[in-house]
Image (spheres, helix red, strand yellow):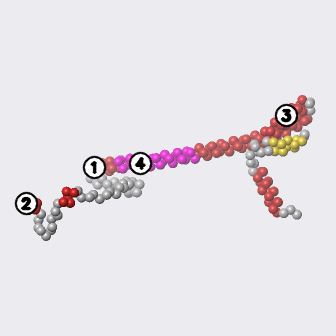
Amino acid sequence: MKSTRSRSRNKNNRNRQNNGGNVINRVFDSSGPEGKVRGTPQQIIDKYNQLARDAQLANDRVATENFQQHAEHYLRLLSEAQKEMEARREEQERQNRERQAERDRERAARQEQDAQPDAAPDAETESAGEQGASEGQDAGDNGLVETPEDKPKPRRSRARKPKQPAPEEASEPVADATEGPAPEAAE
């Protein structure tokens, strides 16, 4: 009795072979009329074509036809694999073009948004000023709801060192509130 382990391993191997894989570079063992021929489909096609030419030179029409049929089988495998690869390549190119077009649209939209806040406040203040002048309304009240994107970003100022008093100011006497008015005020 076979173990379930070997059975499951065989199933996995069968699935892998049926997946297709890369037929163009896969090595096949072909059992032809004159023994095994081993190689990639292109190598097998070349070998069977050579055997067919040899059989034709030997005036063996049956062997020639047999080798040609074997070569044709592998030629069909190869052409089918090439068609599939071409279709996959075209599909990937199409998807890449779509992704690139989407990225371009997103980039253009971002650039428009970046350009809009700079140009939009100028246009809004001009149009609001015109409306306010013609209708007697406040220029800031244009009927629109203000959103965070519309507000200009506050500029951050650098912290400054406190100014130290000039030497002249420090030498002058400070008038005391109990002494009365300062001498300059009395004059």
Q: Which residue is mark 4?
A: 116
Left or right of residue 129: residue 118: right
Q: Earlier in the sequence, mark 3 or mark 2?
A: 3
Query: Within the image, what quadrant is residue 6 found in?
Result: bottom right
Q: Answer whether residue 153 is visible to the viewer in this image.
A: yes
Q: CA distance from mark 4 to mark 2?
A: 62 Å
Q: What kind of residue is marked 2? A: Glu
Mark 3 or mark 2, which is nearer to you?
2
Q: Residue tagged by mark 3?
A: 50
Q: Which mark is residue 187?
A: 2
Residue in the picture at 40% in, 57% down? 148
- Say what secondary structure mark 4 lies in: helix
Which residue: 41% across, 54% down?
149
Q: Label 3 vs label 1: CA separation?
A: 95 Å
Q: Alpha-carbon distance for marks 3 and 2? A: 129 Å
Q: Is residue 21 above or below residue 70?
A: below
Residue 161 image point, x, y percent: 31, 57
Within 10 angstroms of label 2, few (less than 14), some, or many (20 or more) residues?
few
**13 relative to 160 in the view: left or right:** right
Q: CA distance from mark 4 to mark 3?
A: 72 Å
Residue at the limit of the structure toward the bottom, as seen here: 178
Q: Nearer the viewer, mark 4 or mark 1?
A: 4
Q: Amino acid at mark 1?
A: Ser
Tell which tag, 4 or 2, sits nearer the viewer.
Answer: 2
- Asked if the residue under mark 1 is in contact with the one under mark 2, i.e. CB atoms within 8 Å, the reply is no
The boundaries of the magenta stretch are: 99-123
Mark 4 or mark 3, earlier in chain: 3
The residue labelled by disc 1 is 134
Sooner in the amino-acid sequence: mark 3 or mark 1: 3
Q: Residues within 10 Å of mark 3 (few under 14, many from 20)?
A: some
